[in-house]
Image (spheres, helix red, strand yellow):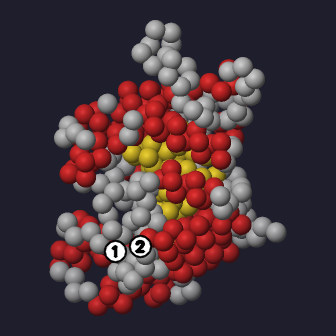
Amino acid sequence: MDENRGDQIRGTKGGTASVPLSVLDLVTVGQGRTATQALRTSVDIAKLTESRGFHRFWVAEHHSMPGVASSSPAVILAHLAAHTERIRLGSGGVMLPNHAPLVIAEQFGTLEAMAPGRVDLGLGRAPGTDGATAAALRRTDRLNEGADDFPQQLAELTRFLDDDFPDGHPYARIHAVPGPVQATSPGGVQSPARPPVWLLGSSGFSARLAGVLGLPFAFAHHFSARNTVPALDLYRESFKPSAVLDAPYALIGVAALAADDEREARRQVLTGALSMVRLRTGRPGLVPSPEEAEAYDFSPMEREFVDGWLKDIVHGTADEVRTGLDDLAKRTGADELMITANAHGGEARLRSYELIADAYGLPRAD
């Protein structure tokens, strides 16, 4: 096993947390807020969670959604790298079918050069948007082809990252720069690391592929909770030791929000639930305020959806959230929990991460 990459993947427990804690940020934009403010909040959250000992900070790729300003993960990660020093930064994830593998290898090679030894490359095969937007991104209407070709695209991307296409391959003389080719050039120096690849998923396909390839796996429990345990079981059953990992390593994304009291936590998570109602019914928009969410007249069908949605969000006081996260880690056997706190305002999200850190006794950096 490559110990360097293995150490990058494994998290370090902090305080009394049973598993490492990390963050998934969607750069959400609330009503009355701008994308500029949302990005500043993401920097504030990254700095806060770094100071409290969270292990990773990932951003997702979404398109054509007014309330989510994370359409360009690589750009956002470069910005975060300039404002942090230790926390691992990564994509949760880059949607591989939307991009040429060489472009991703170049982008994340650049990020690795900016923040050596602390960049993760999480990859998904979903479009991160609706079909029409995906077609506009890919300049093709053959959307199924992108998903079906995912293993081949992944293999090509890995070859570019390692710069090891075999002789005779059409891409053997093409190099992702920054990358390993610079070390083999006259006077070149070997870079100490390259970004470890993670596979992301919300079903069994990526779970099995990650297992077969011996890669770390991140499951989207926050929007596919019913599939979590079956997918993790499939990952572990399929796992084959590799140069990257000698044993499975599974992270799960968890929607969680802590507040000073239960009522405030409920007010905040209801804003995200209303956003999902609007998204699922073809009306995506900015994240509503708590006041608008409380006053909204949900139809019976919408109320049923919201009640089910909220059951999968760990929310309440800091102690209640800690209990919920610990129970989830125990039930799923996850090696790491990646928390996403979606709410209208940045203040509520910052407060949530502070409260969770306090509940687990995570130390404050000097």
Which mark sits nearer the N-terminus, 1 or 2? Answer: 2
Q: Nearer the viewer, residue 237 or 271?
A: 271
Are discs 1 and 2 less than 8 Å apart at CB?
Answer: yes
Give the residue displayed 53% in from the left and 25% down from the top. Answer: 175
State the image quarter where residue 303 is shown.
bottom left
Q: Is mark 2 on a helix, strand or loop?
A: loop
Whether residue 254 is visible here, answered yes or no, is yes
Give the residue displayed 32% in from the left and 84% down from the top. Answer: 293
Which residue appears farthest toward the front when viewing the image? 186
Give the residue displayed 40% in from the left and 77% down from the top. Answer: 30
Residue, disc 2 = 29
State the image quarter where residue 63 is shown.
bottom left
Percent x, y for residue 226? Answer: 35, 56
Give the residue displayed 30% in from the left and 47% down from the top. Answer: 137
Q: Say what amino acid the circle numbered 2 marks.
A: Val
Percent x, y for residue 118? Answer: 66, 47
Q: Residues within 10 Å of mark 2 (few under 14, many from 20)?
A: many
Q: In this view, does 119 lie to the left or right of 343?
A: right
Q: Residues within 10 Å of mark 1 (few under 14, many from 20)?
A: some
Q: Is residue 106 left or right of residue 15?
A: left
Q: Which of 117 and 290 is in front in this view?
A: 117
Residue, disc 1 = 286
Whether residue 321 is visible here, answered yes or no, is no
Q: In which quarter of the image is the N terminus?
A: top right
Q: Which of 167 and 343 is in front in this view?
A: 167
Measured Cα–Cα span from mark 1 to mark 2? 6 Å
Q: Quadrant of the C terminus?
A: bottom right
Percent x, y for residue 253? Answer: 48, 57
Q: Is mark 1 on a helix, strand or loop?
A: loop
Q: Say what amino acid the circle numbered 1 marks.
A: Leu
